[in-house]
Image (cartoon, helix red, strand yellow):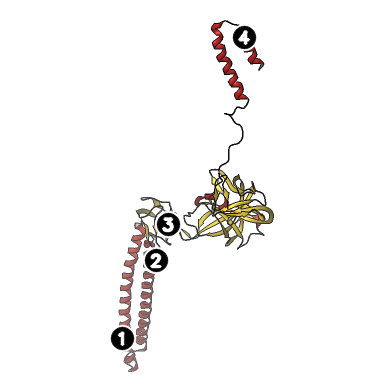
Amino acid sequence: MMLIDRLIVGIWGHGNTSKLCGLLLLAAVAGFSLAGCGGKGHEAGPKAAGPVTVVKGVATEIVKSDSVSETVEVVGTVRAATSAVVSARIPGTVNVLNVREGDRVRKGQLLARLDAQENQAKAALAVAGIDEARRGVDEAAASKRLADTTFERYHKLFNEQAVTRQEFDVKQTEKELASQGLARAEARLKQAQESSRAAGVMADYTRIVAPISGIITAKQADLGATVFPAQPIFTIEDEGRYLLELAIPDSMASRVKPGTAVQVTLDAVNATFAAQIAEIVPASDPVSRTFTAKIPLSRKGLRSGMFGRGAVSSGTGVSGIMVPRKALVERGALTSVWVLDKDSIARMRLVKIGKQLGERLEILSGLSEGERVVVSGAEKVSEGVKVE
């Protein structure tokens, strides 16, 4: 008010020309002062709250502290339970190549063919040897028949004392020699047949066939390449069964046995599930100081070489808070849950998760025992709604 009085005195102290302007300025200042003092047009106080939205059909759970087993996480690799490395058995050049990586093949299917002329020539020579040996048997058999007939004739003459003892002995010896000649001829025929069979097998090695049914995961030779015995050409894996091979530290050897429960995580197929160790390799790696534990897998979309993790119990336990996995609300990199206050009003709460045990997750921070959280129907809930 003192400011207004001074303005009035100042205005009336000037000429009439500025009186009108002074009065307008005085009115503006007075209006501003009244507004600042809380006039009727600017009432202070909270706005009236609207009706609260009520959501039904939502399941909740009281957070409790449970015993959480301490686990050790180890890494591993997915491998096919059955695989075969197809190698060349004879030297040769690949002149036929029927498959490539990713092709599915069946047992006995022709994969490739080698050009091995030397082996084929040996097979043809062995077949010719059989023919020659068979003719030798025929000749020896004819000679034996003649020797037998002559011996019988001389035997009668000897009984009639028409020939001497020496002549009879000569014919008897010729008969025995003919029998031995036939036996040698038959042995040579059998030898030729076995040689031909072996040469045929060697020649058949030019055909590279699939030993098992599966998928071609590797091809180490191209068309026109020269291969040698024991050189790998293909790798075939059976798609029916896969194993996760975990590298377990030697320090856990006394606690890890066939049947031990493991929580398996396969990031490539976005899967986490409980499994059991089926087999343990009875030898340790002297470099990494680990031993291998094998876990059967039945998930779809698996491939050999995938990365996997396994959480193995260390034998100790601590107290922790566990909630169902369905209670989590994931938005980008943030993980939260819906928490209900004493009036059943939903509030979003950020949490930090730990290990997963079955379908429940450990909550490291963000929740306290006794709080009520939404465990089903979280998609119906929003901030500030009332849950019934």
Tell me: 216 left or right of 319.
Answer: left
Return the disc, 4 or 2, that comes first in the chain's sequence: 4
Helix, strand, or loop for circle 3? strand
Residue 98 locus on image (x, y percent): 35, 55
Please, what is the three-letter code of the amino acid marked with disc 4?
Answer: Gly
* Mark 1 or 2, closer to the camera: 2
Return the disc, 4 or 1, that comes first in the chain's sequence: 4
Residue bearing the label numbered 2: 198
Give the numbered dot on residue 215.
Answer: 3
Tell me: 224 left or right of 271.
Answer: left
Residue bearing the label numbered 1: 149
* Mark 4 or 2, closer to the camera: 4
Mark 4 is surrounded, within 10 Å at the Cα level, by few (under 14), some (14 to 19) or many (20 or more) other residues, namely: few
Give the numbered dot on residue 191.
Answer: none
* Mark 4 or 1, closer to the camera: 4
CA separation in Å, label 2 and label 3 = 31 Å
Q: Is residue 206 shown to the viewer in this render?
A: no
From what the image shows, is residue 293 above or below residue 162? above
CA separation in Å, label 3 and label 1 = 68 Å
* Disc 1 to disc 2: CB gap under 8 Å: no
* Mark 3 or 1, closer to the camera: 3
Please, what is the three-letter code of the amino acid marked with disc 1?
Answer: Thr
Mark 1 is surrounded, within 10 Å at the Cα level, by few (under 14), some (14 to 19) or many (20 or more) other residues, namely: some
